[in-house]
Image: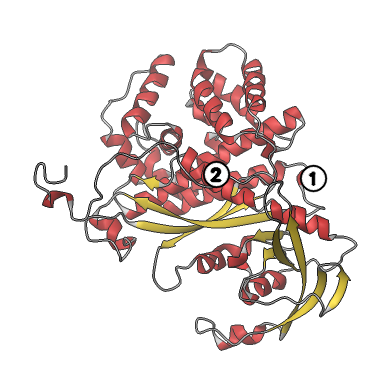
Amino acid sequence: MFDSFRSRMAAVHKSEDLYFASLLSAQTITQVFGEARPILDSARIYTTAVTVWTFLSQTLSLDHGCVQAVAKLIAFRLARGQRPCSAQTGAYCIARDKLDEAAMHRLVTHTAQQAEDAAPDSWLWLGHRVITGDGCTITMADTAENQAAYPQQKTQKPGCGFPIMRCVVLFGLATGVVLEAALGKYQGKLTAEVSLFRQIDDIIGAGDVFLGDRVYSGWFDIARLMARDAQAVVRKHQARRTDFRRGTRHGKDDHQVEWAKPARPSWMSETEYKSYPNSLTLREVRIRVHTPGFRTREVIAVTTLLDPQEYSKEDIGALYRRRWQAELNLRSLKSVMQMDHLRCKEPHRVRNEMRAHLVAYNLIRQVMCEAAVHGQVSPWQISFKGTLTTVVELLPVLGSIQNPQEFSNVLLSCCLIHVVGNRPGRYEPRVVKRRPKPYKLMNKPRHAYKYGEAQ
């Protein structure tokens, strides 16, 4: 199934392509960028493919700096017997600035679809592809351009905060790849998490199951999915009451009910409102989470999967507990790959920097999927951070080996060593042990401080 990594690795070993081409081939970049490619392909060094590879290498590094990215390119050229390029980062930054935003976004979805298409059927949930999602916020460099596009929070004084972006990311539950992402301001009209979700929910097609928390349990959001013959398993919103004595009973804590159509919201047109049915037939299931040493928690899930024989209450409960995987995937992006704070100083560069992180994340997930097939395990049992470290350290030596097939086997075997602990129902509060530095918080612009005043 996942044999493209080995074939690309063998091709890179014979060609003059940068080592990163073993994860993302030059042919794929050419195909995805299309008409946007000639903008850079006339360059002597920083062609479209080289710029994308260097950009991805930068997002996977610990330093995240342009100097380190260019230094890696110089080291590769020297190892191949080529003349080194300039160590100045200006040419690289100019080339990165010219990367087309739409093409970079297509690169995200293309790398995700490659992994989804190659995934074996055994990774599906009862024959369905499951898509899960969640929202987060990301800060960026404090410049006038970024502040104009993504203003900081209103409670912060000017010059004391960072521009902030809200984003919603949809993941494939089986492979963990980013299928789609929507970006927007943190505050303002149509910038809420569910509003961004509606911009990209059309990726959830017929037969797919969307797995989400209570933010996505609105009547119209479920109706939009059902209109495309897609299914949903979401947590019931706390404002909606549930009485298991009513409706069509399927068993203990499992019944089928009718949700009447609510009044038309202000953001929806009259035509769209009339296109929805007068009610939705849904199923509500109470899930009990038993954790030794803690009080039993109860979660009520709402689903469009009405057949209790084909989709048992236990199946629904087990699936909903995997919704936490979206949180872990976001943690891999924001904490492990350091996407929580982006460094570019202009909005379009910031958006491309985020997309570069998503593409690099998908490429690491592809390696995890191939390693999972190689070791006959599930991809979510393999550590993302362990795979990331292995790939970053081993790929640069690709050009100095004799047998790329053996190198591929070693890399995949190393990835399989780092497994994720099986700790269902664990309770780990977000606390830190290391004390923070005793610095005062900034409450006015930095240039307003005098020497010694902030000590």
Q: Is residue 131 depicted above or below 223 in this figure?
A: above
Residue under label 1? 121
Image x and y of residue 317, in percent: 76, 57
Please tell me which residue lies in front, 178 or 36: 178
Q: Which mark is residue 31?
A: 2
Measure how far apart labels 1 and 2 are at the Cα level.
27 Å
Please state which of the two labelled residues, at mark 1 or mark 2, is closer to the viewer. 1
What residue sits 76% from the left and 81% below the top? 258
Left or right: 439, with 375 as reference point:
left
What residue sits 53% from the left and 30% below the top? 21
Circle 1 packing at 10 Å, graded few (<14), some (14-19), many (20+), is few
Image x and y of residue 155, in percent: 30, 65
Image x and y of residue 263, in percent: 60, 87
Quick one: which residue is furthest to the right in this view?
309
Q: Secondary structure at mark 2?
A: helix
Circle 2 packing at 10 Å, graded few (<14), some (14-19), many (20+), is few
| Residue type beneath disc 1 | Asp
Left or right: 368, with 51 as reference point:
right
Q: Secondary structure at mark 1?
A: helix
What residue sits 29% from the left and 35% below the top? 91
Name the colour scheme.
secondary structure
- Please say whether residue 29 is visible from this viewpoint: no
| Residue type beneath disc 2 | Gln
Q: If the image is split into quadrants, where does the C terminus sit?
A: top left
Quick one: which residue is furthest to the left in this view?
450
Q: If the image is split into quadrants, where does the N terminus sit?
A: top right
- Please say whether residue 57 is visible from this viewpoint: yes
Left or right: 125, with 83 as reference point:
right
Image x and y of residue 412, in percent: 65, 25
What residue sits 30% from the left and 52% below the top? 346
- Residue 212, by quadrant, is bottom right
Please tell me which residue lies in front, 20 or 273: 273
